[in-house]
Image (cartoon, grey):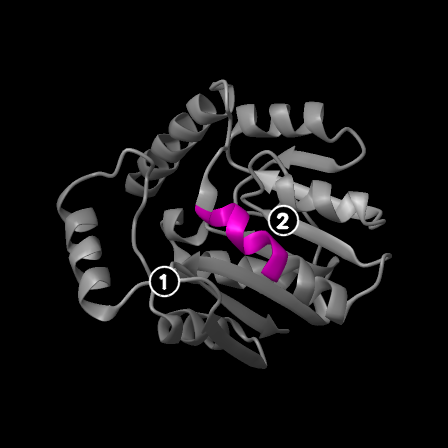
Amino acid sequence: MQNNRIKEKSRNYFNELAQAENGYDIPEPKKCYPYIIDVIEKIGDRKSKILDIGCGEGDVLLQLSEMGYTSLYGVDLSDEAVKRAKELNPKINFTVGDVEQLPFDDEEFDVIVCSHSFHHYPDPALAMSEMYRALQRNGRLLLVENDTFFLRRICINISLMLRHHPAGDIRWYSRNKLCRLAEKAGFSYAHCETITNRSAMLEAVR
């Protein structure tokens, strides 16, 4: 029940954000998109089947579409975000869904992207396992998250434990913790490194 309340809080927050005049105008995730796209360009081809979890309005997928990628999927808990994404990007497959029960078959995707969304998930181990399940063998997970120094992360997490964040934030993870979660889910390779002064990217291979 607690997890459902947290999800509802996140859903409501991002529904309101999607309906705002500027929508998902959040600077830090946008700074990370070039890093995500650069890795996708290096590991795949234009026929790669790509899923963006917590896709919001679909900015990453729109950029990939403009580059010639044709098999693009986005899933988000916010129905208003998905509605807006469909209006902005009618050629891309968007759906409302929960990362803990992804509405996709086993081993369906070549690449899964999850950018600045993981810290909202009530059950990070289950979320990571679902990402693993939906990836093809040798498929790649690109997970971007908030990154900061140890003491600041501890203070942030204590604050999140003591009060409910308006956006439904639950926990910020260290780079080592993200790698351990990926390895526990079954990924054969996991590496996480800083990409901006505020974000890090986990690359994990199924």
Identify which residue is drawn at 50% across, 62% down: 128
Residue 57: name its quadrant. Answer: top right
Contact? badges 1 and 2 (CB < 8 Å) = no
Mostly what secondary structure, the magenta segment?
Answer: helix
**Residue 69 lies in the magenta stretch:** no
Tag 1: amino acid = Asp
| Mark 1–mark 2 distance (CA, rounded to whole Å) | 20 Å
Q: Earlier in the sequence, mark 1 or mark 2?
A: 2
Q: Is residue 112 above or below residue 163?
A: below
Range covered by the magenta-colored residues: 28-35
> Closer to the camera, 123 or 75?
75
**Residue 135 appearing in the image:** no
| Residue receiving disc 2 | 52
Identify which residue is drawn at 38% across, 52% down: 119
**Residue 119 appearing in the image:** yes
> Closer to the camera, 118 or 20?
20
Identify which residue is drawn at 68% across, 51% down: 51
> Closer to the camera, 136 or 150?
150
87 left or right, relative to 23: right
Tag 2: amino acid = Asp
Question: Tag 2's secondary structure?
Answer: strand
45 left or right, relative to 93: right
Residue 5: where, in percent of width, then height? 32, 34
Question: Tag 1's secondary structure?
Answer: loop
| Residue receiving disc 1 | 147
In which quadrant is the N terminus drawn?
top left
